[in-house]
Image (spheres, coloured by chain):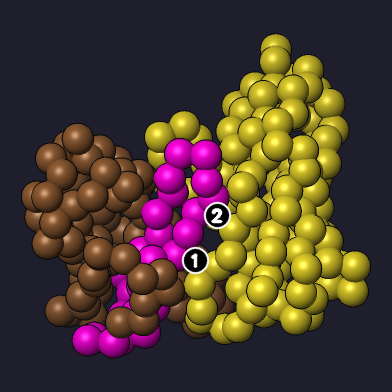
Amino acid sequence: KQEVTQIPAALSVPEGENLVLNCSFTDSAIYNLQWFRQDPGKGLTSLLLIQSSQREQTSGRLNASLDKSSGRSTLYIAASQPGDSATYLCALANQAGTALIFGKGTTLSVSS
Amino acid sequence: SQTIHQWPATLVQPVGSPLSLECTVEGTSNPNLYWYRQAAGRGLQLLFYSVGIGQISSEVPQNLSASRPQDRQFILSSKKLLLSDSGFYLCAWSRTSYEQYFGPGTRLTVT
C-alpha cells in the first residue's frame, strides 16, 4: 500500500530564506506527483505536476524534483515571502486517472 | 478556461439528516471527477471518483454515495448523516494530463 510522508509537519522561517520541503513515498511505481498549496479554510491550488518520466519542474520561485528510485520529492522555494505562508501538500497517483494519495502536509510560516 | 464550483460553501446539519453536495465543472468535457474529504488532523482521503456519466467508484465504505447525472456534474449524498461525516469536502477534476484541479470546498459540520 502506497504511503506518503511529509517532513517536517511545520516550518517557520524568516522572509528571504530559501527552503526545502520533503515528501517521501514507499512505492516507486508512480504515474505522477503533484505539489499543492492550501490556505486555511480554502481549497487546493496546484503548484507543480511532475510526470513519472520527469526529474523536475519549475514555476517562478518554485522548483520540484522527483527521484523515484529513492522514493523522494522535494519542493524548493526560493526567497520566501510572507505570502508563501500556507500548508503544502504532496500527492501522487499510482496509475493514470486514479485518485491522488496525499501526505499530511507541511505548514509553512514565513515571518516578515 | 476551466472552472470548478462547489456548493454550498458551508453547511451545518443535525445527525440523521440527509446530505446533498454539488460540484460542477465548466470549460471542459468528459473530465474525471473526484470527491475527497479532509477531516481534522487527517490527510485528504478519496471518497469517490468517476470516469464518466453513471460510472462511480468508491474507495472507502461508508454511509455516503455519489452520482454523476451529467458529464460535468458530480453529487455527494447521504441519507442519514453521522457525527463522523463532519469535515471539509473537496471536489476535483482532471483530464488528459491527469493533473487534478480542486474546487473551493464545502465545510460540513454535523451536530
Q: Which residue is mark 2?
A: A46
What residue range appears in magenta? B27-55
Q: Residue at point 69% right, 64% down? A: A3
Q: Position of residue A104 (x, y in %)?
A: 61, 47
Whether residue A30 is visible here, answered yes or no, is yes
Horizontal side of B64 relative to A20 (left or right) equals: left
Viewer-nearest residue: B81 or A53: B81
Amino acid type for the residue under numbered disc 1: Gln
Mark 2 falls within which chain? A
Label placed on residue B89: none
Q: Position of residue A51 (x, y in %)?
A: 70, 74
Q: Colour of chain B?
A: brown
Whether residue B10 is visible here, answered yes or no, is no
Q: Which residue is mark 1?
A: B100
Q: Position of residue A103 (x, y in %)?
A: 64, 53
Amino acid type for the residue under numbered disc 2: Ser
